[in-house]
Amino acid sequence: MNILFVGDIFGSAGRKIVREHLGHLRKAREVDLVVINAENAAGGFGLTPQIADDLFDLGADVLTTGNHVWDKRELIDYMNSVPSDSAERPRRVLRPANLQQGLPGHGVFEGTTQGGVDYAVIDLMGRVFMNGTNDPFHIVNDLMAEIRAKVIVVDFHAEATSEKVAMGWHLDGRVTAVIGTHTHIPTADERVLPGGTAYQTDVGMSGPYDSVIGVETSLVLHRFLTNMPGKFEAAKANPKMCAALITCDPPTGRASAIQRIMMGE
Ligand SMILES: [Fe+2]
Ligand SMILES: [Fe+2]
C-alpha cells in the first residue's frame, strides 16, 4: 500500500499547489492514505475549519499540526464538535499528542482505508528548542501500547535534526514511517531504517519557496536587520508541494520504500 505524506501547507500558495497536484498524484501513484500537515495552511498561521474541509475534499484522510495548532481559535470548536470515538472530519484533525494534558483535540487517529487496512496516525512534537511539550519519547511508547493497527504513521514536528533522527531510531521496527515536519526545508536523508521504518528528517513545506520558510522575504530580512517587530505575511511566489511517498506491507506495517517528491507549477 502507498501512503502520501504532504509537508506543512503554507498559506494560499501552499493550498493552491496542493490542489493542483494531490488529485493526479493520488491516482498515478495509487495512494491509499493521505496525511497532510496543515498547521500553516491559513495564511501561514494555523488552520480553519473551512480550510480543513477543503483539504478533506481534495482527498486528505488525516490532517496533522504542530506548534501553530491554536493560531486560529475556531479550530478548537471544530475539534470539540465530535466525540472522541468519531471518525468524522473534525476528529481527523490532530494536534501534537504530547501537549499538556486535558487540552482540546487528540494526538492520535485510528481509522481504516477504503481498501480495508487499519491504520493509525500519531502527531508528536519535539522538545528541543520548542515550548510546551512533554517528553515525546516516553509518550509515544504509551501511545503505541494502545494502538492495534500495524500501519502507523508518525508526524514528528520538531526543530532539531538530532531529536528527529533519534525518534526515527526509537520507533524503528515499531511504526511504518516517522516523517519530520516544522522546519519547512526538505532533507535529503529519506531511507528505510533496518527495522522497516521509513524515515525522513523533514519532508519540507508545501508553499512559496521564494520566501523565508513561507514568510515574505523582505519582512523577515527587516526583522533580522533591525530587530524591530513587524507583521509577518505569507509569501506567494514559486510554490512547491513537498511530500514523501511511502510503500509498505499492510499485514506487517513494514515499509519497503520511501520517495521524496517536490512538485512545482
Ligand atoms: Fe510548519
Ligand atoms: Fe511548526
Image (cartoon, grey):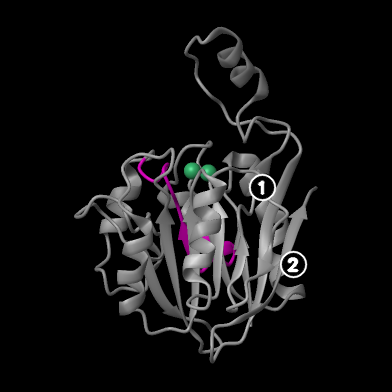
Give the percent coordinates (x, y) of residue 18.
Answer: 66, 54
The amino acid type, in three-letter code, at marker 1 is Lys
The amino acid type, in three-letter code, at marker 2 is His
Count all numbered tags in the image, as a single digit.
2
Give the percent coordinates (x, y) of residue 93.
Answer: 41, 60
> Extreme bottom residue here?
251
Residue 24: give its label: 2
> For residue 36, what is the image quadrant?
bottom right
- The answer to whether any part of residue 53 appears in the image is no
- The answer to whether any part of residue 77 appears in the image is yes
User: Magenta segment, which residues?
Assistant: 55-70
Quadrant placement of the N terminus: bottom right
Residue at 61% across / 87% down in the picture? 249
Residue 161 relative to residue 48: left or right: right
Q: Is residue 90 above or below residue 187?
A: below
Near-viewer residue (133 or 119): 133
State the SS at label 1. Answer: helix
State the SS at label 2. Answer: helix
Which mark sits nearer the N-terminus, 1 or 2?
1
